[in-house]
Image: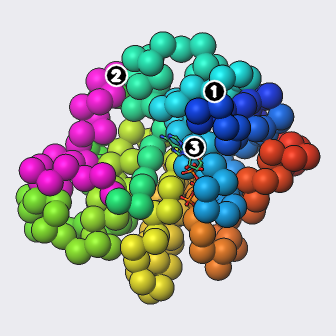
Amino acid sequence: MQSVVALDNVSFAWEQLPIVTIRHWRVARGQKVFLYGPSGSGKSTLLNLLSGILRPQSGSIRVLDQDLTKMQAWARDRFRARHIGMVFQQFNLLPYLSVRENIELAAYFSPATPLDQTWLDHILQRLELTNDLLNRKATGLSVGQQQRVAVARALLNRPELLIADEPTSALDTELRDNFLHLLLGCVEETGASVIFVSHDRTLKDYFDLQLDLRELAGAGEASPC
Ligand SMILES: Nc1ncnc2c1ncn2[C@@H]1O[C@H](COP(=O)(O)OP(=O)(O)OP(=O)(O)O)[C@@H](O)[C@H]1O
């Protein structure tokens, strides 16, 4: 099976303090990974390494066979905009833009990917983002609606990899389950791989593989592929 993510001998330290150490890790195409670990164990740092926001002190991080550690910062930014969708706990929506403009930002940052209006209309419908919401300011929406806008933006360019950092922590149980169904339903259509970080272990059954970050640092061989 082809790997979308391949890490080898990666180490990253904040101010000389080792935070992420991974000998070998593979995530297969279409695989959905639930990543957990104690607070401060380096989950967000790992996601930032996978998306090329941070660069490790040593090792290789390959996404879709491209070694992010060998790219300049501008090339990593361009690669991320095209191939990696990201959803965060705080949504990261721009308050002065409308919902539609917030979503279309993903296409603006990836000029090589023309806006696919048919796909956009489809995900808006799947994510239950109705027409009347699209012209409103993003901050005027409910928490659940804002999170679905963030997902629409993350999926607009049909990324091969979706990274989510605690995206459900602001949602109550009912919204959380609805959100996961919508998110994973859309992802199923694109065939993207998912790396999903959460403290909430009750969510783990939505995913193909549950992984403790500490296992990655230790034995290394965390994925069967
Ligand atoms: N910009 C930074 N500068 C220095 N140290 C940092 C920085 N960002 C994170 N750290 C440290 O790196 C360690 C891992 O942080 P990280 O946010 O990756 O953990 P986490 O597992 O995501 O935690 P949580 O579950 O609480 O969100 C922590 O000790 C944190 O203090």
Residue, disc 1? 56
Residue 63 occupies quadrant = top right
* Residue 64: image tag: none
Say which quarter of the image contains residue 90.
Answer: bottom left
Mark 1 and mark 3: Cα distance apart in space: 10 Å
| Quarter residue 157 falls in | top left
Q: Is mark 3 within 8 Å of ligand 1?
A: yes
Task: Give the image's coloring scheme.
Answer: rainbow
Q: Secondary structure at mark 3?
A: helix
Residue at x 83% of width, y 34% of height:
23
Q: Is residue 41 left or right of residue 110?
A: right
Which of the two labelled residues, at mark 1 and mark 3, occupies the earlier sequence position? Answer: 3
Q: Which residue is mark 2?
A: 112
Dot 2 crowding, Cα within 10 Å, few <14, some 14–19, many 20+: few
Q: Residue furthest front?
A: 16
Q: Secondary structure at mark 1?
A: loop
Give whichever of 14, 221 is nearer the camera. 14
Front residue of 45 and 108: 45
Whether residue 25 is visible, yes or no, is yes
Residue carrying label 3: 45
Between disc 1 and disc 2, the foreground one is 1
CA–CA distance between discs 2 and 3? 28 Å
What is the spatial separation of the Cα atoms under label 1 and label 2, in whole angstroms?
27 Å
Q: Name the quadrant of the C terminus.
A: top right
Residue 134, visible in the rendered structure: no
